[in-house]
Amino acid sequence: MKTNNSLKGIRIIDLSMGWAGPLAARNLADLGADVIKVESCENFDWWRSWEATQEWIDDDGAEKSPAFNSVQRNNRNITLDLSRLEGRELLLKLVGTANAVMENFSGSVLPKLKLSYEIFKDAKKDIILLSMPAFGSTGPWKMFRAYGSTVEQSSGLPHINGLSSDPPMMHHVAYGDAVGGLNGVSALLIALRHQAQAGEGQFIDLSQVESLFPLAAHGILEFTANGKAPLRNGNKSEFFAPHGVYPCVGEDKWIVIQILNEDQWLRFQEIGGADMKRFGDLKDRLSKLDDLDKTIAKWTSTKEAQKLMYILQGAKIPAASTHTMSSLLNDPHLNSRNFWQWLDRAVVGNQPNPSAPFNINGKRLAIKTPAPTLGQHNHEVLTGILGLKQAELDRLEDIGIIGSKPKMPSS
Amino acid sequence: MTKALEGLRVVDIGGSISTEYCSKIFADYGAEVINLEPQSGFETRKSPPFIKGKDESAMHAYLNTKKLSVRKDKLRKESLEDLISSADLVLNNGEKSELSSISRGVFSDISWYGNGGNYDNFIGTDAQCFALNGMLRGLGSVEGPPIIPSGYQAQIVGGMAAFIGSLGQVLGVELGNNKKPSLVETSIYEATLCFTEVGAVSFFNTGLEGKRLGVNRFAPTYPLGVFPCKEGWIGLTVLTPSQWHAFCKLLKMEDLALVPEYQTSLGRLQDIATIEPVIKERLLNFSAKDLFYKAQEEAIPLVQVPTMEELLEVDQFLEREAFTFAVLSDKDSIKVPSVPFRLMETPPSFGGYVADLGENTLSFDK
């Protein structure tokens, strides 16, 4: 493993919350950027909790959210109360030292904080601002509220997934967030390249809903190129058979099997035994699909999913067993590639951290630091970057501009 | 107007959905992208959906606007070497290539499972990535089988991850942080773990294993999902207590609003049997469109769930030019998604011409 310093010297101020923005910031930090996340004690990242209570605060709940901690590694964390003039001014001083600011609020939040791209630009002439609300920064829906789930619901994807007998099917509790995050970091990298080349910053308008359109492209194109919406046929394919998810030994154990050509089918017949010989070429198999699926399901139901996956893949037949969240941590492939990096984190102890999905020069990108605690780098950033004295920090803490413990909102 | 990635040359020697989505972002922002195709063309030229009345892939058209197409077998050896060695970035699909040794820029390999590891020799598919990342098991009815996500979603996500790794390394060279160009190896499977890594880390901390709860049912909250209205479908997510209260008021279910157990997202999830029939009945009094605007006025995250046909007519997407055109060599065109993010000083090019196989070969054969 090796730390990556491709973006050394680049500083990002991350005002984003939840999943999408922080995931984008995490990717930049993995590549060596100095990412400083700014929260406040009252208005902390809602991914720490959206139902905070005093009991939760007293129990260090803010430091225990696995979801929050999983996207904050390699960052620095400071607190500033941006609703007050002094906090806002310190933020703008920090922006003056940065390459980019990022936020993923709904459209009404920055104006409430008296912040905007123009104001950030006054603080730093060539600043980049990535704004990534659900529906983008223009258009009649620009102020509308959404979560990652809303983003998927609005993208058209549900109407091209699932079974026609069910409602249009979602994939995930927050599918749009992860994809929005990947688009966010892509957009920032492009803008950083232009900033380095031309000395010019800019505003980036990212729509999280539109970020999902490429994932729905097959359905969109079926309609625009052929005038018909794709059928919601569940696991059935009009091009391949067998093509499905079949039960294996044990509770809720499954295997995906997809035969993509006739050579694979001949090999599958050899492994599957006599019952499979009843089915012929693709046309024959497609005409007997229910019978074929039942025959395969009967065969797989006596097999252990992961073992069968290795047997079929060993014969060059596409197959994969289904993981659970627990088995994912023990995936032999991921473990052989050191995908999970274990780091000791304050309050919660040793934690698994997912690696970046790409290796550089054959090496994993080493994670330097686990998720920081709330305000962990107040001193380091405010004295080291902004030149404040310790007495000034003490005063800011006394009046609640900075801090390291969440507070219940005053109203 | 300046293009942010102008001056970069990207050569795609892989021709997969992932390499082409990765290079599409480069092309949209001004890089010169050259598809170096075999005699039979890239595989994506045979990928559904196809364009009605033509033997052409709509997917290939969407992914390849503004790119040039060069036939590898028609290039002389020195021309081929010049092309590869002049590229800032070469994109490959995981198969071994003799061209990697000629590359002088960043060489970026995008494969299903990455180079090395237990699944190194596995044949990959989109469905497999979702099976192995743990997402598939949560989809579909309680009794199963789980339902495979449609299309090329894993490959698109892999292409995005590769774009981040690749441009990150190109930028590292330009900034002087990387002394020499690098090899970037992206695993499509690992890229899709962005959806489930949080679940795995949560399991490690809580010991709670999620179960398949049924179509559109996901922990940790309810109501969340896609529901029928008098006309159309709505998508709904109620998370916070204030959203729950506002939603109850909107649907005139004030009696449910203050039930103590329903003040938390998990509390509501545990009593779906009581809440859902009431919600479903009330929703049938509204059209999806009316309810959408009323709910958003109350800051409730509720939207219409558009069909493919409706998606292309949504005013928000029309105003933002969320769809553009891929223009074919016979001057026909098809509507395709635009770029999801806009850099305002260096805007992307929307859509564009799709080169026929080998159309630009002569320009590169010196």
Image (spheres, coloured by chain):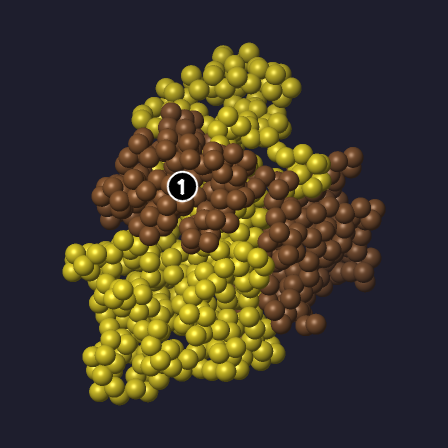
Chain colours: A yellow, B brown
- Asked which quadrant contains residue B232, the reply is top right
Q: Position of residue B3 (x, y in %)?
A: 66, 69
Examine the rendering and report whether any part of residue B216 can be seen: yes
The tally of labels here is 1
> Type of residue at label 1?
Leu
- Asked which quadrant contains residue A111, the reply is bottom left
Q: Chain of mark 1?
A: B
In-image side of B48 versus A264 (left or right): right
User: What residue appears at the point 61 percent right and 48 percent down from the top-left corner?
Assistant: B314
In-image side of B327 versus A235 (left or right): right
Residues B306 and B94: in front is B306
Examine the rendering and report whether any part of residue A153 can be seen: no
Q: Position of residue A169 (x, y in %)?
A: 48, 36
Quadrant including the N terminus of chain B: bottom right
User: What residue appears at the point 59 percent right and 67 percent down from the top-left corner?
Assistant: B343
Vertical placement of residue A112 versus B260, above or below: below
Crowd rating for badge 1 (residues with CA inside 10 Å; few <14, some 14–19, many 20+):
some
Residues B123 and B61: in front is B61
User: What residue appears at the point 62 percent right and 72 percent down from the top-left corner?
Assistant: B345
In-image side of A369 versus A172 (left or right): left
In-image side of B213 versus A146 (left or right): left
Q: Position of residue B240 (x, y in %)?
A: 33, 51
Q: Secondary structure beneath disc 1? A: loop
User: What residue appears at the point 43 percent right and 74 percent down from the top-left corner?
Assistant: A114
Vertical placement of residue B4 versus B21, above or below: below
Quadrant including the C terminus of chain B: bottom right
Q: Position of residue A401 (x, y in %)?
A: 28, 76
Name the residue carrying label 1.
B251
Residues B162 and A213: in front is A213
